[in-house]
């Protein structure tokens, strides 16, 4: 039983360790996006939100509207993949939704032409930040392939809430000439046989922005410190203190009575045994 107990304790300690790590990371992300995200909203730094979604992004805005208390901003982003010494670049449109009032969880956005419609949604970037991110038609990744948006002459954007209530209906226009990432990345690769890091920032092209939680590592250290203290204390109580005092307490009155009965029986049996021998 001692071995089983110690194994169970070890397994529980591992689960608590991962819980402590997960809790600390959640708190770090919350603090980081609360602080830096609010700062980005105040400064109008949209790149904080769309710059980490794909391999490259263009800081020049493709399209923007600000109406009825809602702002929609659309940027160009791209994924660059090297296969067999060949570069493949896929460009996307990445949309952001801002509002003067608190945003709900989901908003619908429709790109409409006389012959076709692409309907997708905005989802909250973080539950505690008033920023929506546009996902594709299948809701499984951020951004819509630019080729799909350019294939039809979409001329209208309609923004609706979850109930279908129309919040904005405005003219829309994006031209293929506005998209520069594929051309510039291919040109740089052909000239240098490598992909750019910061070499194209002068023309507004940036590599993926990495969100760093390093300034909030103190939360992780505190969580691990609490974990170590809790495990050490519980180990001492269960396996050291308990072992030290187990069996050293005075037996209860009832235990003494039962013990006396067994002693009387034992003495009687021994006397009877001696009489039989005689």
Image (tube, grey):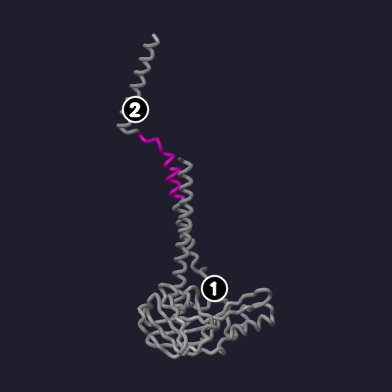
Task: Say if the magenta span includes residue 238.
Answer: yes
Residue 201, by quadrant, is: bottom right
Say which mark, if any, is on residue 210: 1
Element type at marker 1?
loop
Disc 1 crowd rating (10 Å Cα; few below 14, some 14-19, many 20+) is few
Residue 165, by quadrant, is: bottom left
Element type at marker 2?
helix
Farthest-out residue, top = 278
Question: x%, y% of residue 139?
Answer: 47, 74
Question: x%, y% of residue 29?
Answer: 47, 69
The residue under the point 45% across, 57% down is: 226
The residue closer to the viewer here, 57 or 258, is: 57
First reached walking from the N terminus: tag 2 or tag 1: 1
Farthest-out residue, front = 115
The answer to whether 67 appears left or right of 81 in the picture is left
Q: Which residues are magenta?
A: 232-250
Confirm or deny contact between disc 2 and disc 1 (CB under 8 A). Answer: no
Which quadrant is home to the N terminus? top left
The Cα atoms of the two marked residues, 2 and 1, are separated by 73 Å
Say which mark, if any, is on residue 112: none
Which quadrant is home to the C terminus? top left
Q: Say which residue label 2 marks.
A: 259
The answer to whether 102 appears left or right of 229 in the picture is left
């Amino acid at each position: 039983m001692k071995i089983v107990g110690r194994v169970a304790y070890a397994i529980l300690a591992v689960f608590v360790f991962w819980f402590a790590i997960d809790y600390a990371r959640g708190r770090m992300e919350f603090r980081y996006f609360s602080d830096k995200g609010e700062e980005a909203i105040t400064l109008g730094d949209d790149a904080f939100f769309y710059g980490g979604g794909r391999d490259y992004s263009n800081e020049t805005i493709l399209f923007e509207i600000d109406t009825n208390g809602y702002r929609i901003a659309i940027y160009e982003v791209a994924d660059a993949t090297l296969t067999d010494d060949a570069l493949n670049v896929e460009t996307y449109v990445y949309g952001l939704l801002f509002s003067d009032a608190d945003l709900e969880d989901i908003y619908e956005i429709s790109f409409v032409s006389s012959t076709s419609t692409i309907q997708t949604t905005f989802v909250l970037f973080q539950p505690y930040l008033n920023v929506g991110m546009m996902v594709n038609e299948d809701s499984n990744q951020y951004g819509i392939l630019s080729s799909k948006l350019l294939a039809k002459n979409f001329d209208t954007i309609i923004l609706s809430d979850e109930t279908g209530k129309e919040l904005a209906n405005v003219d829309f226009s994006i031209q293929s000439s506005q998209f520069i990432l594929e051309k510039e990345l291919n040109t740089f690769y052909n000239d240098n046989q490598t992909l750019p890091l910061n070499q194209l920032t002068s023309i507004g092209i940036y590599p993926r922005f990495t969100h760093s939680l390093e300034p909030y590592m103190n939360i992780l250290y505190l969580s691990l410190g609490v974990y170590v203290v809790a495990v050490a204390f519980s180990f001492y109580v269960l396996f050291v203190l308990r072992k030290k005092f187990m069996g050293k307490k005075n037996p209860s009155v009832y235990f003494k009575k039962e013990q006396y009965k067994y002693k009387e029986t034992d003495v009687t049996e021994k006397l009877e045994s001696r009489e039989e021998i005689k």
